[in-house]
Image: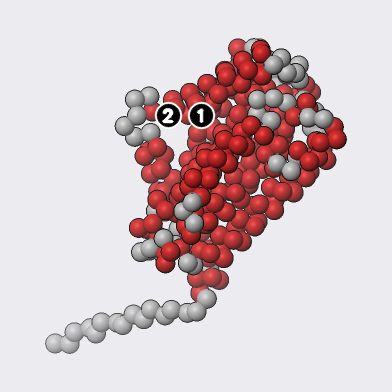
Amino acid sequence: MSYPTAQKQELIIEAGRTERQYWRDLWRYRELFYFLAWRDILVRYKQTVIGVAWALIRPFLTMVVFSVVFGKLAKLPSEGVPYPILVFSAMLPWQFFANSLAECSTSLISNSNLISKVYFPRLIVPTSAIVVAFVDFMFSGIILLGLIAWYNFVPSWRVVTLPLFIGIAFAASMGVGLWLASLNVKYRDFRYIVPFIVQFGLYISPVGFSSSIVPEEWRLVYSLNPMVGVIDGFRWAILGSESRLYWPGFILSLGLVGLLFFSGIWYFRRTERTFADVI
């Protein structure tokens, strides 16, 4: 009686193979991306009393404080709309940006066991962390809808352009997040720097006030903060004719967002091969 011979399988490791197939592997490992994002969403609100309501409470309380301080006490202009709507239309992109930085900066460290043992495109890890922040962004949008209904405010046709500005906010979050995620692997001091960046950025960005109060001669310099263009774009889309977009500053902010996005990907890819050794 003859038995079939077992076929030998060869594993060929070709130099540079993973480099050439990197972007294709992002699609091949999409299930890992879904798993990491869903896991982080579940862990974020696990064993909390009110669960996802935290995504509503934090921006809502911040909006109340800013509306009282800047709207009632300082009596800053509100561009002809209720001050809470002015503030919250800026709180949406800012909270998304701030949460993305917090999640991205620690994402590689949090998944160190996975990174040091298994091959997959590491870009999946910080990107899935941004998805968690985007889920909070979507929940926070419920508050804006409630404010619009409460004040009987009707957005203009410009609201259809909102997805464009959401994409710009995503690019800004991704660019800065990749820089911080990469740097945090090598220099753990960045976990202390990120909260400072978020806190400081909140006050130098036009979240609690309109950027129109900035003197004209300083508007372009002020737009060196890329979040100025993102926030002004959100207000332009949501507030309609009541909001005017400072186009030179917006174009400058948009260029800086693009620079941060592509340079973040470049630096992440450059340092990615060392993550497993350093982490």
Disc 2 and disc 1 in contact, CB within 8 angstroms: yes
Q: Spatial distance from mark 2 to mark 1, Cα to Cα?
A: 8 Å
Indicate the position of residue 134 as horizontal and vertical percent values.
53, 38
Identify residue for label 2.
52
In the image, what residue occupies the spot 42% across and 67% down?
A: 277
- Residue 190's label in the rendered image is none
Q: Which element is circle 1 on?
A: helix
Color scheme of the displayed model = secondary structure
- Residue 139's label in the rendered image is 1
Horizontal side of residue 49 vs 66, given as left or right: left
In the image, what residue occupies the spot 41% across and 60% down?
A: 279
Comes first in the chain, label 2 or label 1: 2
Q: Residues within 10 Å of mark 1 (few under 14, many from 20)?
A: some
Q: How many marks?
A: 2
Indicate the position of residue 107 as horizontal and vertical percent values.
45, 50
Q: From the viewer's perspective, is residue 26 above or below residue 34?
A: below
Whether residue 193 is visible, yes or no, is yes
- Residue type pointed to by label 2: Val
- Foreground residue among 95 and 131: 95
In the image, what residue occupies the spot 80% across and 36% down?
A: 219
Q: Residues within 10 Å of mark 2 (few under 14, many from 20)?
A: some
